[in-house]
Image (cartoon, rainbow, N blue to C red):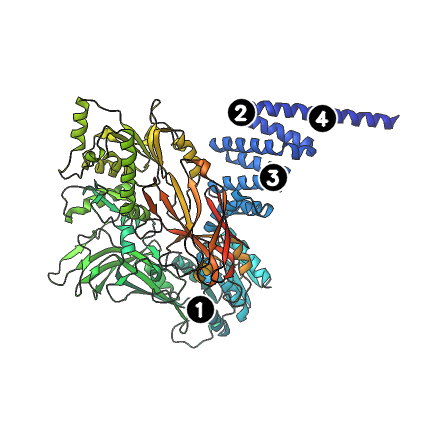
Amino acid sequence: MPNSNAKFQRGGREASRRELVSRSLQSAQHCLEEQDFGTAYAHYLLVLNLAPELKTSVKETFQFTLFKWAEELDSLARIQDLFNCYEQALELYPNDEVICNSMGEHLFRMGFRDEAAGYFHKAVKLNPDFADAKENFYRVANWLVERWHFIMLNDTKRNLTYLKAIEKAVHSGCNSVLDIGTGTGILSMFAKKAGASCVYACELSKTMYELACDVVAANNMGREIKLLHLKSLDIEIPKHIPERVSLVVTETVDAGLFGEGIVESLIHAWEHLLLQPKPKNQEIGAGNYGRVIPASATVFGMAVECKEIRRHHRVGMQEVAGVHLSNSVQFFSPTYAFAGSEETVEPYTTEKLSRIPGGYIPLTEPCQVMTVDFNDLQELKSLATRKPWKLSLPVTEGGILDAIVVWFVLQLDDEHALSTSPSEETCWEQAVYPVQGLLDYSVKTGDTVMVEVCCQDCYLKILKISSLTSECGMDFSDRDNTLSLGNEAELCNALAGLQTTSKQAGSSQVCVLESTEIALLNDVPYHECFKAAMSKVLLSLNPSKDLQSMDVDGHGSGINLQENQNKGSLDEDPDPLYILDVSEGFSILPIIAGKLGPVRAYSSVEKEQHQAALNIISEANHFPKETLEFWLSHLEEESVVLQRPKSDKLWSIIILDVIETSGLIQQEVMEKAAISRCLLHSGGKIFPQYVLVYGMLVESESLLLESAVQGTEPTLGFNIAPFINQFKVPVRVYLDLSTLPCVPLSNPAELLRLDLMNPLLNSPSREVKVQICKSGQVTAIPFWYHIHLDEDHSLNTSGESSHWKQAAVVLDEPIPVQVGDELVLDVQHHKSNISITVKR
């Protein structure tokens, strides 16, 4: 009898469980219909905890509910609740790649890149063919493991020079070593291999710290090197290391030497972590004293002429596609605008001058800018308080003054040195200080370029550049010595006031543009092509108007636009045509459109400074105020930028940004095109209408070295490649094909068509046969785009004047080929990602 009661009770409980599960499923479904995602999610949690056997059948609906509820929590800023939901979901579905990827996306948007990378990486491991996760992982990998890690680890000369300097120091008695900013741990392993008894290493990046742990363990040094997930400034004795060390090794230097904080970290090391320095002229064992590798550095600079630098930092014309750029607007790049401010902004860009398109011309001989002794604490401390100093660079070659280029020689010890000079074969780039704001940029032999330099905010800054002519000693200066401002608004006002020596009278509107935006403004074919294509569409939609007569040059010839529109209003004032430009960044396309007839042009420019500049340019071209409007000011949410201009109107032209400057396709561009097609006037067009992707097969050792560590040879026998290569990405971006060291093995071939107006012509994948025209090894497939605004007007993103860069797919393994061979490429497009694989 007791047994039968127990069975009855169990049966009753089972019936109750099934009843509760059934009711909860019904309630969840009802809540979904009502879009009450939070309650629906709670019901599904109950169901899955009570009935784990239903995991497979409700999985898709549960995922949908989770993602919708997460979106709602995100919009309400309930971040902790959002993460709690994902943790609960991952307890139920620990190996679900879709949930892992979604969790990573939320983390990435909130700035938790290390954590996001872990979830993306797990999703890719669970499903190597999951395109969303792969694309996300590649994106975050570029943030977490910067591409220069691969280049530097492949630089055998750099690695060998550091090894020899560390061996010499350890053999002379430096037995305890601290590696600051260890990265992969290679310098620590050099020290251990040299015989150091105690080796410590610190790394702030969570990803790089975990990578270093794996590398050190794989090289059987896990117990001999103590790794610390800390910034060196936070290391304490004896909490983290037992006592002061006799040697600090570091390579926390950037192209401008000081940009990674080497001065601050070494001041702290000398004060808290290193033994006292060896007194000068005393022959006492090195082990009793502290020292640093590198021991010192000498910084050099020279003035150069370089068209590529110029077109990225100075607007080189007064008129673009018929639009007069008002003298009342002064364009500058951030390196100029913030050079005298108190904001900590990197005051230089970086370039590998040996590979810059069009090359460069030295205008002066190299000049020594400064030296720094990393083994002298007082000298390091004095850098921040050192008064600005002036340099005179005699001009040895006449030309156009475009930039001051800076590099350095890193003296590891009295015997071993590394140079980052543009004339050296090195993994390093050079620091470039573009010249802006001069009245006259031309210099000739015998002139002098004057440069005022200081150390500020852990950077080497150039405060002032001027040229002194040989005839009259006139100083063409670009800025006042006293420029010292705290915020952008003050800075803009001050810069506007500094134009008193310029040819224009009155105040100017300063407009700070990114270097890519300045290059776009200088891209003449781009603007002329858009002008012609827009004119064609507007004429077809409003044939009664002679649009060409509306194209005013702003200097009195032709018909004045405002007069023409006023005259038209007396007769028959046609409804204006609506044009929307949602391209990224600063764009004058709406103003170009405004010159083509009775239009209402809407710009999606966001920054107030950019809007002010566009308004001034619009006024300078005699536009009525209503001709140009800023679309985002009409919207409650920026996310719904693609809408009708008015309830009863549609767009005549929608301009989309399809290609990123980096050489990749913009994210969600096909989704934007789908929305745009629904908002077009009959006969209206999306620009571009379609894009053709072109590519070719090449042999390029440079791309291999920049994409992955090539075995153990460059790392001197240490096993690093398998670990850091987990973070390699198949596509290299920001390439210049004109200067890329490579051998073309095929002719260019059309790889893919992306049609924004007619999606039925699109295919997510395509096989392309490519004929080999030169024997060699295929290592990469560079690709670029022909952007067709219509059948008659197109832009080539690999053209000489193009503001776009190119990209390349780098193969995992080189493929040997002979002339006459044929390779089949499998080309796939998923969202913004293009994948190209070679079918054997």
Residue contact at pointers 2 and 1, CB within 8 angstroms = no
Q: Which residue is mark 2?
A: 35
What residue is pinned by disc 4?
A: 18
**Kind of residue indicated by mark 4:** Arg
- Measure how far apart labels 4 and 1 are at the Cα level: 70 Å
- Mark 2 or 3, nearer chain start: 2
Q: Nearer the viewer, residue 449 or 32?
A: 32
Q: State the residue at coordinates (30%, 58%).
A: 358
Residue 157 is tagged as 1
Quarter of the picture holding the C terminus? bottom right
For residue 90, which numbered disc appears in the image?
Answer: 3
Q: Residues within 10 Å of mark 4 (few under 14, many from 20)?
A: some
Determine contact: label 4, label 2, CB under 8 Å. no
2 vs 3, front mark: 2
Res 18 quadrant in image: top right
Q: Residue 512 location in percent, x, y?
A: 28, 44
Relative to 724, residue 491 above or below: above
Q: Please report whichever mark, 2 or 1, sits nearer to the chain's N-terminal start.
A: 2
Q: Residue at x 20, y 34 (%)?
A: 550
State which quarter of the image contains the N terminus: top right
Element type where label 2 sits in the image? loop
Determine contact: label 4, label 1, CB under 8 Å: no
Q: Earlier in the sequence, mark 3 or mark 1?
A: 3
Marks 2 and 1, how far apart at CA:
62 Å
User: What is the crowding at mark 3: few (fewer than 14 residues within 10 Å), some, or many (at least 20)?
Assistant: some
Q: Amino acid at mark 3?
A: Leu
Q: Is residue 391 left or right of residue 555?
A: right
Task: Give the amino acid at mark 2.
Answer: Gln
Helix, strand or loop at label 4? It is helix
User: In whole angstroms, how far apart are the C-alphas of marks 4 and 2?
Assistant: 25 Å
Residue 391 visible from this viewpoint: yes
In terms of depth relative to the viewer, which is nearer, 641 or 491?
Answer: 641
